[in-house]
Image (cartoon, coloured by chain):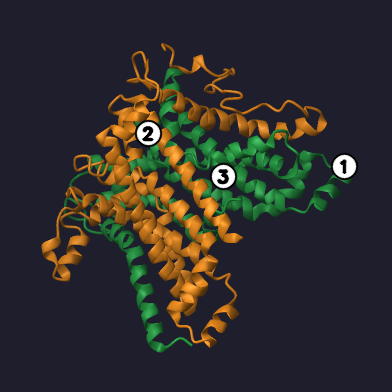
Chain colours: A orange, B green
Amino acid sequence: MADIGPSGTGIMTSGSRPPVAVGVPSVPRPRRGLGPPGWVPLAYLAPGFLVYAAFLLYPLGRAVHLSLFDWDGLTLATFVGFGNYVDVVTDEKLRAAFGHALVLIVFFAGLPTVVGLALAAVLNRAKVRGLAFFRTVVFLPQVVAMVVVGVAWRRLYAPDGSVNDLLRAVGLGGLSRAWLGDTTLALPAVGVAGTWVQTGLVTVLLLAGMSRVPGDLYEAARLDGAGAVREFFAITLPSVRAELAVALTLTVIAALKTFDLIYVTTGGGPGDRTSVPSFEVYNRAFRLGEVGSAAAVGVTLTVLIFVINMAVARIGERGER
Amino acid sequence: MISRAERTANYAILTLFAAFALWPILTILGSALGPPDAGGPGGGLANFAAAWQEGRFGSSMLTSVAVSGFVVLTAGVLSLLTGYAFGTMRVPGSRVLFPLFLLGLMVPTEVIVVPLYFDLRSLGLTNTFWAIALPQVAQSLAFGTFWMRAYFRSRPIALIEAARLDGANSWRILWQVLVPPGRPAIVTMVVLTFMWTWNEFLIPLVMATDESLRTAPLGLTFFQGQHTSGFTLLAAGAVIVATPVVLVYLLLQRHFIRGMLDGAVRE
């Protein structure tokens, strides 16, 4: 196909705006109700929907379209069908990137969930002072730009950074190294930065859930002689199922979407040891000139995120019944 | 009852994690206030002025303010309108249209930025303010529509009915009856949109080739690339970039936490 530009698809609107695809993809225009009850709400909806369709829905459709081509971004594109998707499964580099994303999920979602559960349980049970301060502090990493987080952790992991200082101080100086340049440890090192970012979110979320558990439940358990551990598994954990589902969704998706952090800390290196799908999308589209492949990775990522969302929502629903 | 030993242990755990959370932040702050990279006089607060100059943060912070301001305002107003329609009216085709908006909550930037770049390029629109701002308006609309719809649905129908009986049209009902008491919900939407836009990296990275269009996070990565001798100025730059959102967070903390937690709990 020669024309990969936007003019071939969708309906153009006039003006300086990029193409606005009305009714793309699979947005049926309402057929009925264009009378008084119908046009008023549509008029309120129209401006937002046009921007949304042009800059989100249309590009999403175009990504699917592009993913079926072999295209370097400049010359003619060649239709390759699902070839780019076959690559996602067979190409060593892409498989490695998705594998790295799995490792990041452990650090972005797994660890924060375990730590967050413990922290929230402690905070909820102990009625400690300074809770507001603690919440402010642990949530803070969520609002700091990922680029800044990357700059900070790069510094911590530097050969003369404070991670190595700390190791030397406790007599483990032998373990010190340039963490982000280490072929096996660079990925977990980036992962720990993710743990740092996500733990606060998970803790605050679970804490909100736990504070809704009626206090007499705990009192009854204590009268029965239950200790802190039994109390946790019998009462606390089951009552925060919905919050756990939300926490897992948010953190797993954050792990899959890690781009800024990789870009700033390792640039995918050393070698390709920390390349992740998001980074591959950028790399392929804007550095290697493999636009079709980049789009296929992006679409795969989107489908993954979609499936995880749906799956976790299901689990959350079942928990409520 | 909680024993004294348990209480001490609890405080120890909390202190440990507060320290873990603060460690990178304090490292950055400490470095930013440390001695200058080249040695000699200066250091302390003067580092910020030096970083501002050398990293050209004047320009990138201004771009960030402009982009964030535009996205927050445009997406905010448009979300009020879409949320109002979905929340209080019978929208034809809403069973398809509303899930389409929700879809945007899940679509990663990575997947839309590739076609956006090449399509906007063929229109000669990359490397413009609009190429950076409008995709983010669209992304913010997904959350804004969801969030404002939830607010409008929570308003009592009787309120709207009464205003209608008084002869108010839908436009007046929106701005005079429903928006004023909705300030908390709107503030939450505004601060979250501001945070997301200010911190966004991939879209400006791909779209802005001109130095004058670099946003603050993008400017910081360029500064990181150029400024390789010492960490003091880079740390000062990082503090500059992070400060606006952190300040808003410290002032309006509840809104951040509530929005990010409730916003995640979808129907």
Residues at marks 3 and 1, CA–CA distance in whole angstroms:
32 Å
Identify the disc placed on residue B143: 3
Q: x%, y% of residue A58?
A: 52, 27
Residue pictured at 45% horizontal, 23% vertical: A65
Q: Amino acid at mark 2?
A: Val
**Which residue in the structure is indicated by mark 2?**
A297
Residue A51 versus residue A315 in the image, above or below: above
Q: CA distance from mark 2 to mark 3?
A: 24 Å
Residues beneath discs 2 and 3 located on the same chain: no
Residue B128 place in picture, x, y as percent: 44, 27
- For the residues carrying marks 1 and 2, which lies nearer the camera in this image? 2
Foreground residue among A22 and B26: A22
Q: Secondary structure at mark 2?
A: helix
- Marks 1/2: CA–CA distance: 54 Å
Q: Which residue is mark 1?
A: B167
Task: Report the residue at 73% width, 36% height from top.
Answer: B91
| Residue A190 seen anywhere in this rendered image of the structure | yes
Residue type at mark 1?
A: Gly
- Chain at tag 2: A
- Mark 3 belongs to chain: B
Question: From what the image shows, is residue B176 above or below residue B25?
Answer: above
Q: Chain of mark 1?
A: B
Is residue B55 visible from the viewing direction of this image?
no
Q: Secondary structure at mark 1?
A: loop
Picture coordinates of residue B120, whole percent (x, y): 45, 23
